[in-house]
Amino acid sequence: MAIAKLDVRRPGILVPPLTPFTAKLKVDYVALKKGVDAIIERSKPALIIAAGVEAQEYQFLSFKERFDLIRATIDAVDGRVPVAVGISHPSYKIAIELAHFGEKHGAKAVQLLAPQKPTGGAPTTSELVRYFESIGRETSLPFVLYLNAGPGADLSIPATVELAKLESIKFIKESSRDLARASRLIAEIEQPGLAHYFTTMQMLLITLQLGGSGVTLPPPASDIARLIIDAYEAGDLARATKLQQIFATYPSRWMSYGLAAVMKASSEVLGIPAGRPYPPYDAVQGADLEDLRAFVSGQLAPLQGLVHA
């Protein structure tokens, strides 16, 4: 099946909106819309990801609720930027079903995690190739390959390059903070034109300098990423470096609570309702919360263009 073409701004940011929940643990769609609007205004994303990364907490939803979140995200974006629908699932048949739903509702791409082998043991490169080929035969949407060892498979560099050669895979999101790995994959994937390569927040500036395509991260960290990219493109390396240094301690100082918890608490400080993490997992609390609030109020909010109305 011919793969649809999708051009995204590079260097750019792929942004997964946070998923706010009501007190009854249903998705708060009013708050979701406000969060999407803030992302588009402040982060100026190249692509928005609907229900595609762990920090979006889609794992806690029923299958129907996952469909509803995907559709609500696409509706909230309302064509302002392209949307990639998260279709991650160990079963390629269910991933295809999710992809078809995304196609029906206007998605321009799909994002899927390189899966663990559900029956145990690490998947081989040939197994992963067959997995992605099976999905690619059934959808024309380009893939964002999501690499996150832990929830997903831990791919070697040769295996990652092999997957990048597949026609469907046009973008790769790498969660590793390994500079040696990222720099080699930029050289072997981005530079030869196999796929566009995006890393994560701690790697953003060096990724730009090495020729990578950008970063994937949730709000409000994505707001900082936008400022870094703007400074870099303007040739102001000193400002880009100073901004990048924010990611030396943020969000890592509070990461014992998990990325979703830190981003949700930060968003609340900046006036964007994001709710609490899905239970039984804790929100940032106590002295840690006061510390985070002080950091966000004192260091993030004053940055030009970062204060939300």
Image (tube, rainbow, N blue to C red):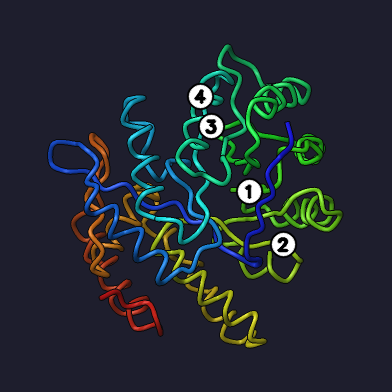
Q: Look at the numbered disc 4 and give the secondary structure of its residue.
A: helix
Tell me the quarter of the picture where residue 129 sits. top right
Identify the residue under disc 3. Answer: 99
For marks 3 and 1, give the CA distance: 21 Å
Q: Is residue 66 above or below residue 214?
A: above
Question: Any mark on residue 174, and which?
Answer: 1
Among all residues in the image, which is located at the extreme right?
192
**Residue at image location 80% in from the left, 50% down from the top:** 189
Q: The C terminus appears in which quarter of the rendering? A: bottom left
**Residue at image location 50% in from the left, 41% down from the top:** 85
Among all residues in the image, which is located at the extreme left?
23
- Characterize the local packing of mark 4: few (<14), some (14-19) or many (20 or more) Cα atoms within 10 angstroms: some
Locate residue 111, reporting x and y percent.
56, 40
Q: Is residue 150 above or below residue 49?
A: above
Locate residue 88, reporting x and y percent.
52, 31
Nearer mark to the viewer, of 4 and 1: 4
Locate residue 121, reporting x and y percent.
64, 17
Disc 2, disc 4: CB below 8 Å? no
Identify the residue under disc 2. Answer: 212
Tell me the quarter of the picture where residue 236 sits. bottom right
**Amino acid of disc 2:** Gly
Q: Look at the numbered disc 2 and give the secondary structure of its residue.
A: loop
Disc 3, disc 1: CB below 8 Å? no
Q: How many marks?
A: 4
Q: Is residue 39 above or below residue 33?
A: below
For marks 4 and 1, give the CA distance: 25 Å
For marks 2 and 3, give the CA distance: 27 Å
Identify the residue under disc 4. Answer: 97
The one nearer the camera, 8 or 265, is 8
**Amino acid of disc 4:** Glu
For marks 4 and 3, give the CA distance: 5 Å
Between disc 3 and disc 1, whose residue precedes?
A: 3
